[in-house]
Amino acid sequence: MHDRTIRILSKHLKSLNIHLPEERKTLKYLLSEEKPRIKLRDGSTHTFKKAELKKLAEILPESMHSRLRLPIYIELSSGRYGRGTARIIGEPEVLVVAKVLGKEIAKKDEIYVYKPELRILRKELPTTTQYIFTFDVG
């Protein structure tokens, strides 16, 4: 792929991902905040629902509360995983997603989620999950 094409795609991706946080916070930290929130790249603020954070705290062992960074990223890639398929990475993230969807864990730090499951996941965890867009340069 040409350098110019990569620069154009990178710029486009940056605009697609403007809704993402400047920095993610851990579940443990967010549970300690009175009004759990993060600042987004576009300058706005995203607030997490306390009930949703408590749900995550029940799903995960307490020892993982400081390892789960929120929001959980649902990675969508142009063509890499197949149409309607997303990837979620990270051990605590995979545990949460598998539990919410009732899926078996094949790999402890990576899970693939399909379109019907994405609807369920976003309905169950609307404030603690977020789409991230990527592209494959290979």
Image (cartoon, grey):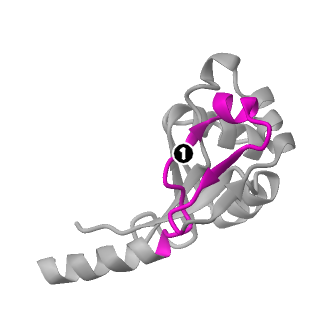
Residue 94 appears in which quarter of the rendering? top right
Instruction: Give, as a single range, the part of the protein colored magenta.
Output: 16-42
- For the N terminus, the quadrant is bottom left
Q: Point out residue 26 in the picture as x, y percentages from the top left corner.
A: 60, 34
Q: Dot 1, how many residues are within 10 Å of its Cα: few (below 14), some (14-19), or many (20+)? A: some
Q: Point out residue 91 in the picture as x, y percentages from the top left corner.
A: 53, 32
Residue type at mark 1 is Arg
Is 53 placed left or right of 28 in the picture? Answer: right
Give the residue at x 69% y 49%: 37
Q: Nearer the viewer, residue 80 or 16?
A: 16
Is 100 placed left or right of 138 in the picture? Answer: right
Give the residue at x 76% y 57%: 126
Any magenta on residue 35? yes
Count of numbered circles in the view = 1
Q: Nearer the viewer, residue 110 or 55?
A: 55
Q: Point out residue 138 in the picture as x, y percentages from the top left corner.
A: 22, 66
Q: Nearer the viewer, residue 19 or 81?
A: 19
Give the residue at x 59% y 25%: 66
Q: Is residue 86 above or below residue 55?
A: below
Q: Nearer the viewer, residue 71 or 75?
A: 71
State the SS at label 1. Answer: loop
Q: Is residue 106 above or below residue 76?
A: above
Q: Is residue 74 above or below residue 115?
A: above
Give the residue at x 56% y 67%: 19
Q: Which residue is labeled 1 in the image? A: 24
Q: Is residue 61 above or below residue 93?
A: above
Any magenta on residue 114? no
Is 43 placed left or right of 81 in the picture? Answer: right
Residue at the farthest left position = 2
